[in-house]
Image: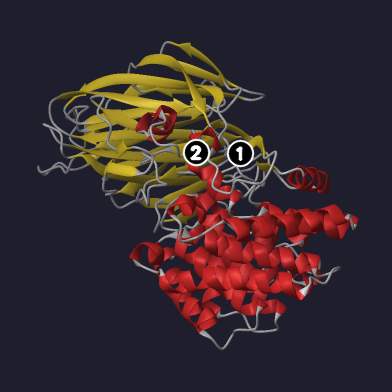
Amino acid sequence: MDMTKELLLQTADMICDNTFIFNHKWDMEACNIPVKFDGEIQWNKIPFEDEEWAFMLNRHKYWTFLGKAYFLTKDEKYLTTFIRQMNSWIDSVELANPEFKDCARTIEMGLRCINWIKTMELFEREYKFDEAFKEKVYNSLKEQCDILLEIYDDFRTLSNWGVLQNCGLITFAFYYGKLDTDYFTVPLKRLEHQCKIQILPDGVHWEQSPMYQNEVLNCLLETAVQFKHHNIEIPQFIRESIRKIGFSNFAMKKPNHHQPMQGDSDDTDLRDIITRCAAVLEDEELKFGGFEEIDFESIWELDKKSIENYSKLQAKKPDYTSVALQNSGNFYLRDSFDEKGNYLWFTCGSIGSGHGHGDMLHFDLTYKGEDFLIDSGRYTYVEGNETRIELKNNYSHNTIIMDNQLFSKFNGSWGIVKTPLPLNSMYKFNDKFDYVEGGHLGYLDQPTPAVSNRKIFYIKPDLWVVVDEFLTRGEHSYKQFFNLDLDVKAELEENHVILKKENTLHMKWSDSVKLSRKDIQISKEYNTLQKSTRIESETSFVENAILFTIISPENLEVEKIQVRRGNLALVGEDEAKAIRVKVSEDREIIFFNSTREVAAQKKTYLLDGVLFYGKTGFIDINKGEKELHIFKY
């Protein structure tokens, strides 16, 4: 949740009572269940059988709340609590002792460097620590930084862990004036390499999980602010990395300003982190994606100059709506950037790391600012938890499977047993319609191999046509999954689903499908589950399969129509299929899809008197005028 002054003070008061709750919106593993220590704090405690709780406890982000609360109230209980708890941690935690292994990971060390120093700086605005305490803190930080310099391998080079530990080292070097030592030069060089290999050209972090992408971004912003605070020019690679990730956040931002729950991500508002990107870079377009004024959270995270300049920035509305992040396989189709706008996110890229889910060909759908179809979230990292595996699997994403065989398979919380190779995706965006497609090779290992493709037509503002295509032989069954947001009411009729919130969407199919409803659980925040619904459609085809799914706020007339060649010969449905959608009294659209290369001389198709060559497209018929659009040849 967003941190307000009231929530900040409430949380700080709990910390003073040795009661810990992880309720910050960017906490990687939130926990809103308070845990109280009646005596000394047991720093390696693992409640709820979730070691992530111990990791969160030892990152000490909550100590920054004490520093902020002290600045706001001048109440010395926040200062004495910080000193007491800091002494407790340093005196009791032995990093080399296996008993404290959950306190001694390098990711926590990096975050501790940042959080300890941020907390010290907050208190030092009003208070001067005694030299003995400062030396104790320094000695502990130096011990941890020496470990961070030593432990650096291929895993840390590619993982968000390494970014966090290198940013921690740089923070240590700035605070203690060690810019001419290895504590600064080594991590800065490592960080530059990491930014080159971890951040794709489209700005998406390779792990394909916005929650962890933004933890990387938060640390890069921390480092950039340190440079600005010390009147040193921000290295170009840091500026460029912030810009790229900032714009990928802007691209993925839903009408309610939240990130999609891709991979291991929560339903989190992106505006504060985009605001910080805009402030640090003085970027007007990024400001359009952030807050009009610096928010309460960001005011603590920025340097004075960035804060002063932010109000002078004129928010610049982009001259585009839809965005293709093709390197990562993420596509965002919109009619506008309005909070009541329409939005579809389609993904067809690498699974990334263990934070990735079986979401190949998944799409989210938001209509008039209301989420209807969503990703189901992550819930927990506890090994052996059945819900964790449920939420990672294909059926918890709005995708399609063949013969009840999952195309992605997982082992425990982190193991990836099987993940399909994505096929090259393509797209075309303009102000009237968007088109995107992608596929995967997840069924090449089946007795009868198949190639799976999904194509999405978006006729603006509010008609979506999804084409699911399987290139194969023999008869197979196919099952689509549609995971609904909270409070979406679903009414099932024959070949027709009505989805209702304040607004209504209708789903229809080109062929007869068997519809069913399942009660499921979704997770919008780590450690939180809520009841929802999944709609499943099931059908079968002989030879190549083509299934059209039509989504619209209106109950449109949909009919399947014959496809002929240019010589009027009838074309079989295993080769090509077309549907007619009556949009209004004066307008109808014919959508077309072909699965084969035509070997004979007659390679043209004929639909409604229009002769053309191509594999995928539509004919827009408005008041008798016919406009042909072909996307694949």
* Residue type indicated by callout 2: Asp
For the residues carrying marks 1 and 2, which lies nearer the camera in this image?
2
Regarding mark 2 in the picture, which secondary structure is present there? loop
Of callouts 1 and 2, which one flags the residue occurring earlier in the amino acid sequence?
Answer: 1
Based on the displayed image, in which of its 4 quarters is residue 460 positioned?
top right
Return the mark for residue 68: none
Regarding mark 1 in the picture, which secondary structure is present there? strand
- Where is mark 2, residue-wise? 50
Quick check: 535 above or below 65?
A: above
In the image, 80 versus 454, the foreground residue is: 80
Quick check: 107 above or below 450?
A: below
What residue is drawn where x is 67% and y is 77%? Answer: 175
Q: Residue furthest right?
A: 74
Is any part of residue 480 visible from this angle? yes
In the image, 364 versus 221, the foreground residue is: 221
Q: Position of residue 557 (x, y in %)?
A: 46, 20
Q: Position of residue 278 (x, y in %)?
A: 67, 65
What residue is drawn where x is 50% and y is 48%? Answer: 332
In the image, 201 versus 57, the foreground residue is: 57
Q: Are marks 1 and 2 in contact (CB under 8 Å)?
A: yes
- Where is mark 1, residue-wise? 31
* Residue type indicated by callout 1: Cys
